[in-house]
Image (cartoon, rainbow, N blue to C red):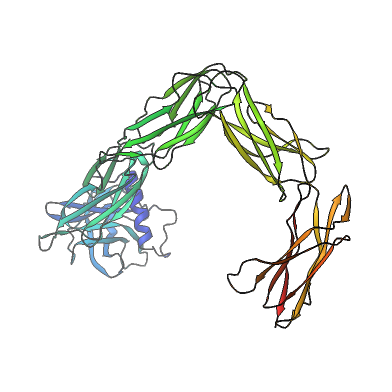
Amino acid sequence: MKKFTAALTTSLVVCTATLVAAPAAHAGDGDSRSRTETLQEGGRIYALYEHMSARFHPKDVTLEIHAKNDPEVLASIRLTGTETCPDTGDCYESTFRSEPVTLPAMGAYVIDVVARDGQPNEIVQRSTGFLNYGLNPKLTLTSSHPWISYDNPTGKVTGSLVAEDPNTHEVKPFAGVGMYYRARETRKEGWVWTNERGRFTTSGYFGEYSTDVTYEYMFDQQYETLSVPFRKQELKFTVDTPAGTVTAPYGSDIPVSGKLTRIADDGTEKPLAAEVRITEGTSGTGKTVVSGENGTFATGYTVKRSGPVSVQPSARSWFTAPSPHSFTLATPPRTSKLSDVKATVSKYRKVTFTGKLGVTQGTYPAGTKAQVSIDYRPEGGTWSSTGTFDAAYGASFTASSPKKADSGAQWRLRLVNASVNSESFKLGRKDTQVWDDGVTPEGVRKGTKVTAKGGLMQKSGSTWRPYGGQKIRVWFKAATAGSTWKELGSTRTLSNGTFSKKFTAQQDGTWQMRYTDTVSSHYADYGREDYVDVR
Protein backbone atom coordinates (compact mmCIF):
# COMPACT_ATOMS: atom_id res chain seq x y z
CA MET A 1 0.00 0.00 0.00
CA LYS A 2 3.02 2.32 0.23
CA LYS A 3 3.02 4.83 -2.63
CA PHE A 4 5.74 7.27 -1.64
CA THR A 5 8.90 7.59 -3.74
CA ALA A 6 12.03 9.06 -2.23
CA ALA A 7 12.41 11.89 -4.76
CA LEU A 8 8.75 12.82 -4.85
CA THR A 9 8.11 12.62 -1.13
CA THR A 10 11.21 14.57 -0.19
CA SER A 11 10.29 17.31 -2.64
CA LEU A 12 6.73 17.32 -1.33
CA VAL A 13 7.72 17.73 2.29
CA VAL A 14 10.17 20.52 1.48
CA CYS A 15 7.67 22.30 -0.72
CA THR A 16 4.78 22.18 1.73
CA ALA A 17 6.95 23.19 4.64
CA THR A 18 7.71 26.44 2.89
CA LEU A 19 4.04 27.22 2.49
CA VAL A 20 2.85 26.73 6.09
CA ALA A 21 5.41 27.14 8.85
CA ALA A 22 5.36 24.46 11.56
CA PRO A 23 5.25 25.86 15.13
CA ALA A 24 8.12 25.38 17.53
CA ALA A 25 5.87 23.73 20.14
CA HIS A 26 5.85 19.90 20.32
CA ALA A 27 9.13 19.61 18.44
CA GLY A 28 10.03 16.13 17.28
CA ASP A 29 13.16 15.77 19.45
CA GLY A 30 14.91 14.09 16.53
CA ASP A 31 11.80 12.06 15.61
CA SER A 32 11.04 11.93 11.88
CA ARG A 33 8.00 13.73 10.52
CA SER A 34 5.10 11.62 9.34
CA ARG A 35 4.03 12.07 5.72
CA THR A 36 0.67 12.34 4.02
CA GLU A 37 -0.66 12.41 0.48
CA THR A 38 -3.91 11.98 -1.46
CA LEU A 39 -5.55 8.66 -2.33
CA GLN A 40 -8.47 8.47 -4.76
CA GLU A 41 -10.36 5.20 -4.72
CA GLY A 42 -13.88 4.07 -5.63
CA GLY A 43 -15.12 7.59 -6.31
CA ARG A 44 -14.06 8.80 -2.87
CA ILE A 45 -11.07 10.77 -1.65
CA TYR A 46 -8.89 9.70 1.26
CA ALA A 47 -5.71 10.87 2.93
CA LEU A 48 -2.87 8.38 2.90
CA TYR A 49 -0.71 8.51 6.02
CA GLU A 50 2.80 7.07 6.45
CA HIS A 51 3.72 6.65 10.10
CA MET A 52 7.25 7.96 10.80
CA SER A 53 7.27 8.36 14.60
CA ALA A 54 8.10 6.17 17.58
CA ARG A 55 6.56 8.65 20.03
CA PHE A 56 2.93 7.82 19.39
CA HIS A 57 0.73 5.05 18.00
CA PRO A 58 -1.17 5.37 14.68
CA LYS A 59 -4.46 4.76 16.50
CA ASP A 60 -3.89 8.08 18.33
CA VAL A 61 -3.59 10.07 15.08
CA THR A 62 -6.11 12.59 13.78
CA LEU A 63 -5.60 14.30 10.44
CA GLU A 64 -6.71 17.92 10.43
CA ILE A 65 -7.32 19.50 7.04
CA HIS A 66 -7.38 23.23 6.31
CA ALA A 67 -6.85 25.66 3.42
CA LYS A 68 -3.27 26.63 2.54
CA ASN A 69 -3.52 30.16 3.89
CA ASP A 70 -6.15 29.65 6.59
CA PRO A 71 -5.58 27.68 9.84
CA GLU A 72 -9.32 27.01 10.33
CA VAL A 73 -9.83 23.23 10.41
CA LEU A 74 -12.36 22.13 7.79
CA ALA A 75 -12.24 18.41 8.53
CA SER A 76 -10.84 16.15 11.26
CA ILE A 77 -10.56 12.54 10.20
CA ARG A 78 -9.27 9.35 11.77
CA LEU A 79 -7.20 6.56 10.31
CA THR A 80 -8.51 3.11 9.45
CA GLY A 81 -6.69 -0.18 9.83
CA THR A 82 -4.66 0.89 12.83
CA GLU A 83 -5.84 -2.21 14.70
CA THR A 84 -3.34 -4.20 12.66
CA CYS A 85 -0.61 -2.42 14.50
CA PRO A 86 -0.01 -4.04 17.95
CA ASP A 87 -0.11 -1.75 20.96
CA THR A 88 3.44 -2.73 21.81
CA GLY A 89 4.78 -1.91 18.33
CA ASP A 90 5.47 1.46 16.73
CA CYS A 91 4.53 0.35 13.15
CA TYR A 92 7.30 2.56 11.82
CA GLU A 93 6.94 3.25 8.06
CA SER A 94 3.55 1.56 7.91
CA THR A 95 0.92 3.24 5.73
CA PHE A 96 -2.74 3.80 6.68
CA ARG A 97 -5.74 5.16 4.88
CA SER A 98 -7.99 7.77 6.43
CA GLU A 99 -11.74 7.84 6.56
CA PRO A 100 -13.37 9.38 3.45
CA VAL A 101 -12.88 13.12 3.22
CA THR A 102 -15.58 15.68 2.45
CA LEU A 103 -14.61 19.32 1.90
CA PRO A 104 -16.52 22.41 0.71
CA ALA A 105 -14.80 22.84 -2.66
CA MET A 106 -12.19 21.42 -5.03
CA GLY A 107 -8.59 22.43 -4.45
CA ALA A 108 -5.39 21.72 -2.59
CA TYR A 109 -5.62 21.56 1.22
CA VAL A 110 -2.93 21.24 3.88
CA ILE A 111 -2.82 18.20 6.18
CA ASP A 112 -1.63 18.50 9.80
CA VAL A 113 -0.94 15.38 11.87
CA VAL A 114 -2.25 15.58 15.47
CA ALA A 115 -1.46 12.77 17.90
CA ARG A 116 -3.44 12.43 21.19
CA ASP A 117 -5.66 15.38 20.25
CA GLY A 118 -6.60 17.50 23.27
CA GLN A 119 -4.48 15.54 25.75
CA PRO A 120 -1.63 17.03 27.79
CA ASN A 121 0.91 15.06 25.78
CA GLU A 122 -0.53 16.13 22.41
CA ILE A 123 1.92 16.25 19.46
CA VAL A 124 1.28 18.33 16.32
CA GLN A 125 3.13 18.01 13.03
CA ARG A 126 2.17 20.87 10.70
CA SER A 127 2.04 20.72 6.91
CA THR A 128 2.89 17.07 6.40
CA GLY A 129 1.44 17.03 2.90
CA PHE A 130 -1.41 18.09 0.62
CA LEU A 131 -4.87 16.68 0.08
CA ASN A 132 -5.88 17.29 -3.52
CA TYR A 133 -9.65 17.33 -3.33
CA GLY A 134 -10.88 16.34 -6.78
CA LEU A 135 -11.93 13.12 -8.52
CA ASN A 136 -10.52 11.53 -11.67
CA PRO A 137 -7.96 14.23 -12.48
CA LYS A 138 -6.89 14.46 -16.10
CA LEU A 139 -3.56 16.02 -17.02
CA THR A 140 -2.74 17.19 -20.58
CA LEU A 141 0.56 18.65 -21.85
CA THR A 142 1.53 20.66 -24.94
CA SER A 143 4.80 22.22 -26.12
CA SER A 144 5.18 25.77 -27.49
CA HIS A 145 7.22 24.35 -30.37
CA PRO A 146 7.49 20.83 -31.79
CA TRP A 147 11.27 20.75 -31.38
CA ILE A 148 14.33 22.46 -29.85
CA SER A 149 16.47 24.33 -32.37
CA TYR A 150 18.64 27.38 -33.00
CA ASP A 151 15.47 29.34 -33.78
CA ASN A 152 13.70 28.03 -30.68
CA PRO A 153 16.19 27.63 -27.81
CA THR A 154 13.57 28.54 -25.22
CA GLY A 155 10.89 25.90 -24.77
CA LYS A 156 7.63 26.25 -22.90
CA VAL A 157 5.51 23.36 -21.72
CA THR A 158 1.94 24.32 -20.92
CA GLY A 159 -0.58 22.04 -19.37
CA SER A 160 -4.05 21.84 -17.95
CA LEU A 161 -5.53 19.85 -15.13
CA VAL A 162 -9.23 19.14 -14.74
CA ALA A 163 -11.07 16.98 -12.22
CA GLU A 164 -14.54 15.96 -11.16
CA ASP A 165 -15.95 17.92 -8.25
CA PRO A 166 -16.60 15.30 -5.49
CA ASN A 167 -19.63 17.30 -4.33
CA THR A 168 -21.38 18.18 -7.63
CA HIS A 169 -19.61 15.69 -9.99
CA GLU A 170 -19.04 18.48 -12.51
CA VAL A 171 -15.73 18.46 -14.44
CA LYS A 172 -13.92 21.69 -13.61
CA PRO A 173 -10.43 23.19 -13.80
CA PHE A 174 -8.42 21.86 -10.88
CA ALA A 175 -7.10 25.15 -9.51
CA GLY A 176 -4.42 25.86 -6.93
CA VAL A 177 -2.84 22.42 -6.83
CA GLY A 178 0.83 21.59 -7.21
CA MET A 179 2.57 18.91 -9.20
CA TYR A 180 6.14 17.73 -9.38
CA TYR A 181 7.96 17.80 -12.73
CA ARG A 182 11.40 16.99 -14.04
CA ALA A 183 13.40 16.89 -17.26
CA ARG A 184 16.17 14.38 -16.68
CA GLU A 185 18.28 15.44 -19.68
CA THR A 186 18.56 19.05 -18.50
CA ARG A 187 18.64 18.15 -14.79
CA LYS A 188 15.73 20.45 -14.16
CA GLU A 189 13.03 19.67 -11.64
CA GLY A 190 10.64 21.42 -9.34
CA TRP A 191 7.03 22.18 -8.52
CA VAL A 192 4.48 24.00 -10.60
CA TRP A 193 1.03 25.20 -9.51
CA THR A 194 -2.17 25.45 -11.50
CA ASN A 195 -3.91 28.81 -11.81
CA GLU A 196 -7.63 29.50 -11.43
CA ARG A 197 -8.21 27.96 -14.87
CA GLY A 198 -6.30 24.82 -13.97
CA ARG A 199 -3.40 25.76 -16.27
CA PHE A 200 0.35 25.94 -15.70
CA THR A 201 3.54 26.72 -17.64
CA THR A 202 7.16 25.71 -17.22
CA SER A 203 10.01 27.17 -19.27
CA GLY A 204 13.50 26.03 -20.08
CA TYR A 205 16.46 27.39 -22.06
CA PHE A 206 18.44 24.96 -24.16
CA GLY A 207 22.03 25.29 -25.36
CA GLU A 208 23.64 24.01 -28.52
CA TYR A 209 24.80 20.85 -26.75
CA SER A 210 21.30 19.85 -25.67
CA THR A 211 19.64 16.58 -26.67
CA ASP A 212 16.08 15.34 -26.98
CA VAL A 213 14.24 16.22 -23.76
CA THR A 214 11.41 14.36 -22.04
CA TYR A 215 9.32 16.21 -19.49
CA GLU A 216 7.66 14.18 -16.74
CA TYR A 217 4.75 15.54 -14.69
CA MET A 218 3.40 13.74 -11.63
CA PHE A 219 0.18 14.54 -9.84
CA ASP A 220 -1.06 11.96 -7.32
CA GLN A 221 -1.65 8.86 -9.44
CA GLN A 222 -1.37 10.87 -12.68
CA TYR A 223 1.86 10.55 -14.64
CA GLU A 224 2.23 12.22 -18.04
CA THR A 225 5.26 12.74 -20.28
CA LEU A 226 6.01 15.01 -23.21
CA SER A 227 9.02 14.49 -25.47
CA VAL A 228 10.57 17.44 -27.32
CA PRO A 229 13.25 16.43 -29.86
CA PHE A 230 16.47 18.35 -30.52
CA ARG A 231 16.68 19.25 -34.19
CA LYS A 232 19.83 20.40 -35.97
CA GLN A 233 19.59 22.87 -38.83
CA GLU A 234 21.45 22.38 -42.08
CA LEU A 235 24.50 24.65 -42.31
CA LYS A 236 25.65 25.75 -45.74
CA PHE A 237 29.21 26.93 -46.21
CA THR A 238 30.82 28.34 -49.34
CA VAL A 239 34.34 29.71 -49.84
CA ASP A 240 34.91 31.96 -52.84
CA THR A 241 38.71 32.12 -52.71
CA PRO A 242 41.26 30.64 -52.69
CA ALA A 243 41.23 27.19 -54.30
CA GLY A 244 43.75 24.65 -55.61
CA THR A 245 47.44 25.43 -55.17
CA VAL A 246 48.25 29.01 -54.20
CA THR A 247 51.61 30.70 -54.85
CA ALA A 248 52.24 33.91 -52.91
CA PRO A 249 55.22 35.72 -51.33
CA TYR A 250 56.36 34.90 -47.82
CA GLY A 251 54.57 37.11 -45.26
CA SER A 252 51.79 38.22 -47.62
CA ASP A 253 48.10 37.99 -46.67
CA ILE A 254 46.14 36.12 -49.33
CA PRO A 255 42.39 36.82 -49.40
CA VAL A 256 40.03 34.23 -47.95
CA SER A 257 36.31 34.96 -48.29
CA GLY A 258 33.00 33.14 -48.26
CA LYS A 259 29.55 32.91 -46.74
CA LEU A 260 27.64 31.03 -44.03
CA THR A 261 23.90 30.35 -44.24
CA ARG A 262 21.48 28.05 -42.45
CA ILE A 263 18.16 26.46 -43.30
CA ALA A 264 15.83 27.94 -40.68
CA ASP A 265 12.87 26.17 -39.08
CA ASP A 266 10.54 27.79 -41.61
CA GLY A 267 12.53 26.28 -44.48
CA THR A 268 14.08 29.54 -45.66
CA GLU A 269 17.82 30.10 -46.08
CA LYS A 270 19.16 32.75 -43.72
CA PRO A 271 22.66 34.22 -43.13
CA LEU A 272 24.55 33.19 -40.01
CA ALA A 273 27.05 35.22 -38.00
CA ALA A 274 29.53 32.67 -36.63
CA GLU A 275 33.23 31.87 -36.28
CA VAL A 276 35.16 30.45 -39.23
CA ARG A 277 38.46 28.75 -38.47
CA ILE A 278 41.41 28.70 -40.90
CA THR A 279 44.01 26.11 -39.91
CA GLU A 280 47.25 24.74 -41.32
CA GLY A 281 47.15 21.00 -41.94
CA THR A 282 46.55 19.01 -38.77
CA SER A 283 48.50 21.38 -36.50
CA GLY A 284 45.42 23.31 -35.40
CA THR A 285 47.31 26.60 -35.67
CA GLY A 286 45.78 29.38 -37.70
CA LYS A 287 43.29 32.20 -37.26
CA THR A 288 39.59 32.78 -36.65
CA VAL A 289 37.29 35.23 -38.41
CA VAL A 290 33.62 35.94 -37.66
CA SER A 291 31.10 36.24 -40.46
CA GLY A 292 28.92 39.35 -40.43
CA GLU A 293 25.17 39.61 -39.99
CA ASN A 294 24.83 38.99 -43.73
CA GLY A 295 26.77 35.73 -43.33
CA THR A 296 29.80 36.84 -45.36
CA PHE A 297 33.40 36.83 -44.16
CA ALA A 298 36.60 38.18 -45.69
CA THR A 299 40.06 38.08 -44.20
CA GLY A 300 43.68 37.66 -45.11
CA TYR A 301 45.66 34.52 -44.37
CA THR A 302 49.38 35.06 -43.79
CA VAL A 303 51.63 32.90 -45.95
CA LYS A 304 54.37 31.39 -43.78
CA ARG A 305 54.88 27.79 -44.94
CA SER A 306 53.79 25.35 -47.60
CA GLY A 307 51.12 22.69 -47.17
CA PRO A 308 47.37 22.20 -46.90
CA VAL A 309 45.07 24.78 -45.32
CA SER A 310 41.53 24.06 -44.12
CA VAL A 311 38.67 26.56 -43.86
CA GLN A 312 35.57 25.56 -41.91
CA PRO A 313 33.02 26.89 -39.43
CA SER A 314 33.81 26.34 -35.78
CA ALA A 315 31.89 23.39 -34.33
CA ARG A 316 28.37 24.38 -33.32
CA SER A 317 25.99 21.63 -32.33
CA TRP A 318 22.95 23.66 -33.40
CA PHE A 319 23.87 22.75 -36.98
CA THR A 320 25.02 19.92 -39.16
CA ALA A 321 28.75 20.07 -39.87
CA PRO A 322 29.47 20.95 -43.54
CA SER A 323 32.56 19.67 -45.33
CA PRO A 324 35.59 21.95 -44.89
CA HIS A 325 37.08 23.88 -47.79
CA SER A 326 40.78 23.33 -48.42
CA PHE A 327 43.58 24.68 -50.57
CA THR A 328 47.33 24.14 -50.72
CA LEU A 329 50.07 26.73 -50.23
CA ALA A 330 53.15 26.35 -52.43
CA THR A 331 56.53 26.98 -50.85
CA PRO A 332 56.45 30.76 -50.29
CA PRO A 333 59.31 32.63 -52.02
CA ARG A 334 60.85 35.63 -50.27
CA THR A 335 60.16 38.04 -53.09
CA SER A 336 58.23 40.96 -51.50
CA LYS A 337 59.57 44.39 -52.37
CA LEU A 338 58.86 47.98 -51.32
CA SER A 339 59.66 50.40 -54.13
CA ASP A 340 59.43 54.15 -54.86
CA VAL A 341 59.15 54.84 -51.15
CA LYS A 342 59.07 58.52 -50.21
CA ALA A 343 58.45 60.19 -46.85
CA THR A 344 57.41 63.72 -45.94
CA VAL A 345 56.61 65.60 -42.77
CA SER A 346 54.10 68.46 -42.77
CA LYS A 347 54.33 71.72 -40.86
CA TYR A 348 51.76 70.19 -38.48
CA ARG A 349 54.15 67.26 -37.73
CA LYS A 350 52.25 64.67 -39.79
CA VAL A 351 54.51 61.98 -41.29
CA THR A 352 53.28 60.51 -44.61
CA PHE A 353 54.72 57.69 -46.71
CA THR A 354 54.02 56.86 -50.34
CA GLY A 355 55.27 53.90 -52.34
CA LYS A 356 54.39 50.65 -54.03
CA LEU A 357 54.28 47.02 -52.88
CA GLY A 358 55.28 44.32 -55.32
CA VAL A 359 57.50 41.29 -55.86
CA THR A 360 60.90 40.80 -57.39
CA GLN A 361 59.61 37.73 -59.24
CA GLY A 362 56.72 35.26 -59.27
CA THR A 363 52.95 35.77 -58.91
CA TYR A 364 50.28 36.19 -56.26
CA PRO A 365 46.46 35.90 -56.12
CA ALA A 366 44.40 39.00 -56.86
CA GLY A 367 43.71 40.93 -53.71
CA THR A 368 46.84 39.74 -51.88
CA LYS A 369 47.96 42.24 -49.23
CA ALA A 370 50.66 42.71 -46.63
CA GLN A 371 50.67 44.43 -43.28
CA VAL A 372 53.12 47.35 -43.26
CA SER A 373 54.45 49.03 -40.13
CA ILE A 374 55.54 52.67 -39.95
CA ASP A 375 58.58 52.52 -37.69
CA TYR A 376 60.19 55.33 -35.68
CA ARG A 377 63.62 55.64 -34.05
CA PRO A 378 64.58 58.70 -31.98
CA GLU A 379 68.17 59.86 -31.93
CA GLY A 380 70.17 57.31 -29.92
CA GLY A 381 67.11 55.05 -29.56
CA THR A 382 65.77 51.84 -31.09
CA TRP A 383 63.14 51.16 -33.72
CA SER A 384 59.49 50.84 -32.68
CA SER A 385 56.21 50.67 -34.58
CA THR A 386 53.91 53.70 -34.56
CA GLY A 387 51.09 51.86 -36.33
CA THR A 388 50.34 49.62 -39.31
CA PHE A 389 48.35 49.70 -42.55
CA ASP A 390 47.43 47.19 -45.24
CA ALA A 391 49.04 47.57 -48.67
CA ALA A 392 47.88 45.67 -51.77
CA TYR A 393 50.43 43.93 -53.99
CA GLY A 394 50.81 45.63 -57.35
CA ALA A 395 49.32 48.91 -56.14
CA SER A 396 50.61 52.25 -54.86
CA PHE A 397 49.87 53.34 -51.33
CA THR A 398 49.75 56.45 -49.17
CA ALA A 399 49.75 56.14 -45.39
CA SER A 400 50.38 58.41 -42.41
CA SER A 401 51.60 57.72 -38.91
CA PRO A 402 49.41 58.52 -35.88
CA LYS A 403 52.58 59.68 -34.12
CA LYS A 404 53.59 63.32 -34.52
CA ALA A 405 57.12 63.97 -35.75
CA ASP A 406 59.79 65.64 -33.67
CA SER A 407 62.84 67.57 -34.82
CA GLY A 408 65.07 64.81 -36.21
CA ALA A 409 64.15 61.13 -35.78
CA GLN A 410 64.57 58.24 -38.25
CA TRP A 411 61.50 56.76 -40.00
CA ARG A 412 61.02 53.70 -42.23
CA LEU A 413 58.50 51.15 -43.53
CA ARG A 414 58.62 47.45 -42.61
CA LEU A 415 56.64 44.44 -43.86
CA VAL A 416 55.47 43.00 -40.56
CA ASN A 417 55.50 39.31 -41.54
CA ALA A 418 58.30 39.28 -44.11
CA SER A 419 61.22 41.18 -42.48
CA VAL A 420 61.49 43.52 -45.46
CA ASN A 421 62.44 47.14 -44.69
CA SER A 422 62.47 50.29 -46.77
CA GLU A 423 65.33 52.74 -46.59
CA SER A 424 65.20 55.02 -43.55
CA PHE A 425 64.41 58.73 -43.67
CA LYS A 426 65.48 61.44 -41.27
CA LEU A 427 62.38 63.55 -40.93
CA GLY A 428 61.96 66.70 -38.94
CA ARG A 429 61.73 70.45 -39.01
CA LYS A 430 62.80 73.13 -36.59
CA ASP A 431 60.51 73.67 -33.65
CA THR A 432 58.85 77.07 -33.31
CA GLN A 433 56.99 78.62 -30.41
CA VAL A 434 54.57 81.53 -30.06
CA TRP A 435 55.34 82.91 -26.59
CA ASP A 436 54.42 85.71 -24.19
CA ASP A 437 51.32 86.22 -26.32
CA GLY A 438 47.99 87.77 -25.43
CA VAL A 439 45.55 90.65 -25.92
CA THR A 440 45.55 93.78 -23.74
CA PRO A 441 43.76 95.28 -22.00
CA GLU A 442 41.65 92.36 -20.76
CA GLY A 443 38.40 94.21 -19.96
CA VAL A 444 37.40 97.04 -22.37
CA ARG A 445 34.40 98.89 -23.67
CA LYS A 446 33.03 98.20 -27.13
CA GLY A 447 34.87 100.23 -29.75
CA THR A 448 38.06 100.47 -27.67
CA LYS A 449 41.38 99.51 -29.24
CA VAL A 450 43.11 96.36 -28.01
CA THR A 451 46.60 95.11 -28.87
CA ALA A 452 47.42 91.57 -29.94
CA LYS A 453 51.08 90.99 -29.20
CA GLY A 454 53.71 88.37 -28.41
CA GLY A 455 56.87 86.81 -29.74
CA LEU A 456 58.02 83.98 -32.03
CA MET A 457 61.09 81.81 -31.44
CA GLN A 458 62.78 79.00 -33.35
CA LYS A 459 64.90 76.24 -31.90
CA SER A 460 68.46 75.79 -33.18
CA GLY A 461 70.02 72.73 -31.62
CA SER A 462 69.18 73.10 -27.96
CA THR A 463 68.88 76.91 -28.02
CA TRP A 464 65.79 79.02 -28.63
CA ARG A 465 66.36 82.18 -30.72
CA PRO A 466 64.12 85.04 -31.92
CA TYR A 467 62.57 84.37 -35.30
CA GLY A 468 62.06 87.62 -37.24
CA GLY A 469 60.35 88.40 -40.51
CA GLN A 470 57.59 85.81 -40.08
CA LYS A 471 53.87 86.26 -40.64
CA ILE A 472 51.62 85.92 -37.60
CA ARG A 473 47.88 85.57 -38.13
CA VAL A 474 45.40 86.80 -35.48
CA TRP A 475 42.21 84.75 -35.02
CA PHE A 476 39.07 85.46 -33.01
CA LYS A 477 36.01 83.41 -31.92
CA ALA A 478 33.00 85.27 -30.52
CA ALA A 479 31.50 84.12 -27.21
CA THR A 480 28.04 83.65 -28.77
CA ALA A 481 26.78 80.09 -29.23
CA GLY A 482 27.69 78.46 -32.54
CA SER A 483 30.51 80.89 -33.32
CA THR A 484 33.56 79.70 -35.26
CA TRP A 485 37.12 80.96 -35.57
CA LYS A 486 37.69 83.87 -37.95
CA GLU A 487 40.93 85.51 -39.05
CA LEU A 488 40.93 89.25 -38.19
CA GLY A 489 44.30 90.18 -39.65
CA SER A 490 48.03 89.52 -39.63
CA THR A 491 51.36 91.11 -38.73
CA ARG A 492 55.09 90.26 -39.04
CA THR A 493 57.68 89.63 -36.38
CA LEU A 494 60.51 92.10 -35.86
CA SER A 495 64.16 91.10 -35.81
CA ASN A 496 63.84 90.37 -32.07
CA GLY A 497 60.91 88.05 -32.80
CA THR A 498 58.23 90.28 -31.28
CA PHE A 499 55.00 91.35 -32.95
CA SER A 500 51.96 93.50 -32.19
CA LYS A 501 48.84 94.70 -33.95
CA LYS A 502 45.89 96.81 -32.85
CA PHE A 503 42.23 95.87 -33.34
CA THR A 504 38.90 97.42 -32.35
CA ALA A 505 37.09 95.38 -29.70
CA GLN A 506 33.53 94.63 -30.84
CA GLN A 507 32.33 91.80 -28.58
CA ASP A 508 33.33 89.24 -25.96
CA GLY A 509 35.40 86.38 -27.27
CA THR A 510 38.64 84.44 -27.47
CA TRP A 511 41.78 85.54 -29.32
CA GLN A 512 44.67 83.41 -30.60
CA MET A 513 47.92 84.11 -32.49
CA ARG A 514 49.01 81.48 -35.02
CA TYR A 515 52.21 80.89 -36.95
CA THR A 516 51.13 78.82 -39.96
CA ASP A 517 52.93 80.41 -42.92
CA THR A 518 56.04 78.35 -42.46
CA VAL A 519 58.87 77.46 -44.77
CA SER A 520 59.61 73.77 -45.39
CA SER A 521 62.24 73.72 -42.66
CA HIS A 522 59.98 74.81 -39.74
CA TYR A 523 56.92 73.55 -37.87
CA ALA A 524 53.82 75.66 -37.29
CA ASP A 525 52.69 76.70 -33.81
CA TYR A 526 49.58 78.11 -32.12
CA GLY A 527 49.64 80.53 -29.21
CA ARG A 528 47.39 80.34 -26.18
CA GLU A 529 43.69 81.17 -26.25
CA ASP A 530 43.03 84.48 -24.49
CA TYR A 531 39.48 85.53 -23.54
CA VAL A 532 38.68 89.29 -23.56
CA ASP A 533 35.57 90.69 -21.87
CA VAL A 534 33.98 93.58 -23.85
CA ARG A 535 31.55 95.64 -21.76
Residue in front for this viewpoint, 167 or 480? 480
Instruction: Residue at 39% x, 36% y: name it.
Output: 209
Give the residue at the far left of this rendering: 169
The quadrant in which residue 19 appears is: bottom left
| In this picture, residue 424 sits left or right of residue 338 | right
Q: Describe residue 288's horizontal placement relative to residue 23 as left or right.
A: right
- Residue 406: tell me if it is visible: yes
Residue 500 on image: x %, y %:
81, 68
Report the side of 63 relative to 514 (left or right): left
Quadrant (top left, top right, bottom left, bottom right) of the N terminus: top left
Name the image quarter holding residue 486: bottom right
- Image location of residue 91, percent across then percent down: 31, 48
User: In the picture shown, does residue 462 fall above or below 18?
Assistant: above
Viewer-proximal residue among 99 and 335: 335
User: How many numbered callouts?
Assistant: 0
* Residue at left offset 82%, top offset 58%: 469
Residue at screen point 65% across, 42% down: 400
243 vs 345, left or right, is left
Could you say where residue 249 lies in the image, as x and y percent from the top left?
Answer: 58, 22
Decide: is 490 above or below 46: below
Please state, as top left, top right, bottom left or bottom right, where the C terminus lies in the image: bottom right
Q: Position of residue 401 (x, y in %)?
A: 67, 43
- The residue at the point 88 percent across, 60 percent down is 495
Is residue 50 something that shows in the picture?
no
Residue nearest the observer in this picture, 190 or 414: 414
Residue 519, relative to residue 512: is it above or below?
Answer: above
Instruction: State the image quarter where residue 426 is shown.
Output: top right
